[in-house]
Image (cartoon, helix red, strand yellow):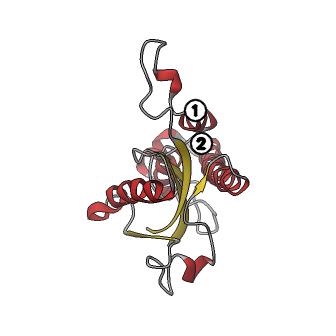
Amino acid sequence: MHQIIRVLVFANDKEEALSNAGEVLDNLCENNRVFDYYSLFTDEDSTEVSGKGRWGDLPEAVLASSKEGKKLIEDGINYTKKEFIDNLKKIKRMIKKFSMEDLFNERSNKSTKNDKFDLSMFKHWLYLAGMYQGTAIWLYDQNGDGIKDAGYLKNVLDKWECNYDKNEKNPDIDKDVWVVPADVHC
């Protein structure tokens, strides 16, 4: 499965943004850890099955404050939220229908062949709803951590200024926030 994730990095220019995002993505793909592989939307990284060849033209890297950057970020957080809500709805229906014992054992006398719920999926949906990295997360920060909610996203866009007091200089304060889209395979 392919999906487009977005990596938010602090950088002085586009080249530095691509380099920083490449390090994040290398780490996310190292030893098939989170994703199998990635392609950026640069001419040299695209193939017929990934990057521009699969999705068409997307920017290589854009400032988060630009119209295109804001759209990429908005789409990423919306996809992450949708994944969370879809999984939570499935979880809630399962909790209403089955006992905790049934859910733990992944079987029930109530379940039939016509039942649209496969009890073995319950723990998988829990896993997806609680993911910090992987297919349910569409935005990542410069450390490779998944951006799961609006508060975390705000902290990244503010360059974690909340972590520094008046006497301490944020090393990223003079850098820009860049958005680097990447086609990942999982």
- Is 15 above or below relative to 114? above
For label 2, count other residues whose C-alpha is less than 10 Å away and answer few (under 14), some (14-19) or many (20+): some
- Closer to the chain start, of discs 1 and 2, is 2
What is the quadrant of the C terminus in the image? bottom left
Q: Going 49% across and 43% down the picture, which residue do you hit?
A: 130
Choose top left, top right, bottom left or bottom right for residue 36: bottom left
- Label of residue 158 in the image: 1
- Label of residue 61 in the image: none
Q: Position of residue 50 (x, y in %)?
A: 50, 78
User: Which structural element holds mark 1?
Assistant: loop
Q: Going 51% across and 57% down the picture, which residue do you hit?
A: 14
Q: Is residue 54 left or right of residue 186?
A: right
Q: Position of residue 170 (x, y in %)?
A: 44, 27
**Most distant residue in the left direction:** 31
Kindly identify the amino acid type of the residue bearing the numbered disc 2. Ile
- Is 37 above or below relative to 13? below
Of the pair 17 and 113, the residue shown nearer to us: 17
Q: CA distance from mark 1 to mark 2?
A: 38 Å
